[in-house]
Amino acid sequence: MALWRIDTERASARVTFSPGIPGLGITVRGLSGRFDLTLGDDGRPDMRVPIRGEFALALGDLDTGPFTKVSRSLLAGGDEIPIRGTIRDVARTRGDGHDEFGFTVEVTMRGETHATDGLGTSGVLVGDRLGVEGRTTVNPRAVGIPVPKL
């Protein structure tokens, strides 16, 4: 097992919600973190060995269209909201020959932890870099974003 660091200069994060809300936009800053994982002989993550990761980022701005003034109260404590998270229960979804995997992400924001499932894809090790993408969908109200019902 080896410790891998998220490349803060190349990493990006985007936040989307379901149900989708017209005009809802979130700016995320400062994605960083690390993961413990083992590579197989083919240069891909060996998902038979447990994979666990931790990350941090900040919710920097929230735009909810006509409801922006209401939702700005979410940022009332400062310019950014620190978010910490863990990724666990990583497993291939379609067998060893595929790069798609499922995972559980737990996000802690303002002292509350919320968990949701996600899907991701892994690349092959190129030099000292391993590309990985993951996506998950969250109901904004479930994580404390005060978006009024439309």
Image (cartoon, rainbow, N blue to C red):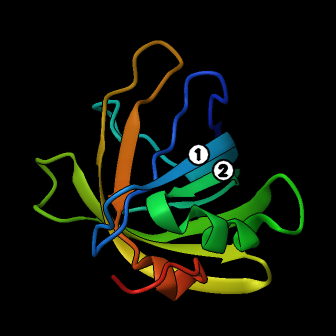
Q: Quadrant of residue 89?
A: bottom left
- Label 2, residues with CA under 10 Å away: few <14, some 14-19, many ≥20: some
Going 12% across and 60% down the picture, which residue do you hit?
A: 95
Q: Is residue 7 above or below residue 30?
A: above
Characterize the local packing of mark 1: few (<14), some (14-19) or many (20 or more) Cα atoms within 10 angstroms: some
Percent across and percent down for residue 75 are: 77, 64
Question: What label does residue 27 carry, if any?
Answer: 1
Task: Assign a secondary structure to mark 1.
Answer: strand
Out of 112 and 101, give the one closest to the viewer. 112
Q: Nearer the viewer, residue 138 or 8?
A: 138
Q: Is residue 47 visible?
A: no
Residue 128 vs 4, above or below: the answer is: above
Mark 1 near mark 2, Cβ–Cβ under 8 Å? yes
Question: Hey, what amino acid is under mark 1?
Answer: Thr
The reply, left or right, for residue 76 in relation to residue 45 is: right
Q: Residue at x 47, y 83 (%)?
A: 148
Q: Is residue 5 left or right of residue 51?
A: right
Residue 97 in view of the camera = yes
Secondary structure beneath disc 2? strand
Question: Quarter of the image holding residue 5?
Answer: top right
Which image quarter is the C terminus in?
Answer: bottom left
Amino acid under disc 2: Asp
Q: Which residue is mark 2?
A: 61
Instruction: State how far apart marks 1 and 2 are (Cα).
Output: 5 Å
Q: Residue furthest top?
A: 127
Q: Residue 103 sits in which quadrant?
A: bottom left
Residue 93 - label = none
Residue 106 x/y as whole percent: 57, 76
- Which residue sits at x=79%, y=83%? 111
Image location of residue 2, percent across then percent down? 62, 43
For the point 36% across and 67% down, the residue is: 17
